[in-house]
Amino acid sequence: MLNGVDINYIVVILITGAVFLAALYHSVLYLHRKTLILAHYSGYLWFTFFYLLLRLFTPVSITATHPLFFLNPDESLLMAAAAMYVRFMGTALDIDKEKEKAFYNYNNRTKYIIVAYIFVEIILLHSTVSEIYGGLLSVAIRLYLFSLGLFYIFKVIVRRKIIYYNYLAAGAVCMILFGLAATLVKIFDPTHHSPLNALSFLLIGYFADVIFFSSAIGYKIKTDAMEKEKAQNMILEQNDFLRKIQIEKIETIYKTREDERIRIAKDLHDDIGASLSSIHLYTELAAKTFDTDPQKTKRILQEIESNSQKAMDEMGDIVWAIRPSADEDKNLSSRIKNYGAGLLAVKNINCNYNIEAALDKLLVNVETRKNILLIIKEAINNIAKYSCAANAAVNMITENTCIVLSVTDDGKGFDIENIIKGNGLTNMQNRTRYMEGTFNIISSSTAGTQVICTIPLTKFSE
């Protein structure tokens, strides 16, 4: 009493109301968020509230004549709150089952120890030895919980760099300090000379604990929401990035196909179109000379046959470049050998072919495939027409970051300085330049001719 006012009773009323509001708020919060930490903390607050409510309306201990005596409600509610507190701290500290196995087991078995204590306490309450063993058991369980509280403080101090754990540490320290104060008052002030009794000190500890732990949960909810928002923003950014890449891929595919259509149209116009135009002109001329000059008509028909074969070959090259086949008889090496055999064999020129097998798989660029094939065909054609060679060789190998293509013969050669460049030689140079490569011809009357093209590997797959 202080000036006729029971301060302890006022403390009980105020803190009971505060705990009730906190329990109600965190329960609503749990219904909204459905998190384990809120479930445990709400349970702790409700058990604490009912304990305080009981103390508010029954300020003295329940006697043996009271209808609730057999349940020992004071101690049962207090220990039930302690059990929920332990579960809350276990969840709040996020104890790792594998890395912190000893502490995890220590914390996890506590709830079973508390439940066992409540049942044993109720049994002892109705026995003749309740005062002796009941008191010892009560002291033992409190010392056990005190030691667990010290472990909690140690754990949160280790993690003190995070604000969330600082709040937990403050709450745990308040509980222990005010719990010790309540114990000291109960031991050294049995006649209640102090304005605040043991229960008031304990309740102030509860109140401080509720404030700090509520702050910790509020901070955690805030940080979780921020992390969730950050994660969602990252997902949105990733989705935007992936969508952008997908759009770029589609645009690249579209552009590639458009470029391919333009290139095919150009090839058909330049190569096949020219051959067909020649055939058309020769056909008209043959019709005019058919009756008057049979010999001339025969020569014209031979030209028509030659141009038709050329058009078929050019069409075959275009189709082969667009649709390469995995069949061995349709790969680059086989196509070159077949072409060379048709021209060189009739001239009794022996030709050796050395084309790396792996190059067919590397050679995926359509335009590069066609250019390489046409360069080799033009070089072979020149050997057959002009070289008077006995031997020839076609080599295509990898050197560092380039492909080196060479077509050589041991024929009569020619004077590079005085040679008049025709369409064939110019086309080979242009095709090599298109592939960003280098083109060289080495020729002499004693060593034959070498056509050497060096092409970057990047042009094979672009």
Image: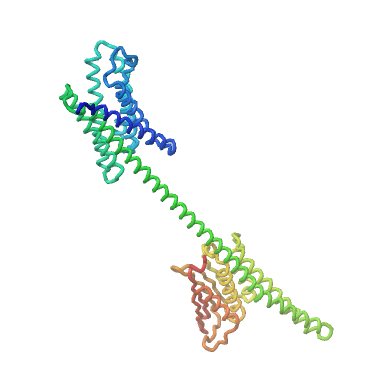
Q: Position of residue 247 (x, y in %)?
A: 54, 60
**Image quarter for residue 87?**
top left
- Number of marks in the rendered image: 0
Q: Coloring scheme of the render?
A: rainbow
Viewed as shown, does residue 319 lie left or right of 15? right
Viewed as shown, does residue 309 lie left or right of 437? right
In this rendering, is residue 267 above or below 104? below
Q: Position of residue 189 (x, y in %)?
A: 16, 24
What residue appears at the point 25 percent right and 32 percent down from the top-left corner?
204
In this rendering, is residue 236 above or below 321? above
In this rendering, is residue 374 above or below 156? below
Q: Position of residue 333 (x, y in %)?
A: 57, 66
> Which quarter of the rendered picture does the N terminus lie within?
top left
In this rendering, is residue 299 above or below 32? below
Q: Residue furthest front?
A: 3
Which is more toward the observer, 16 or 411?
16
What residue appears at the point 28 percent right and 11 percent down from the top-left corner?
127
Which is more toward the observer, 326 or 103?
103
Viewed as shown, does residue 64 lie left or right of 388? left
**Image quarter for residue 26?**
top left
Which is more toward the observer, 183 or 285?
183
**Image quarter for residue 24?**
top left
Which is more toward the observer, 194 or 133?
194
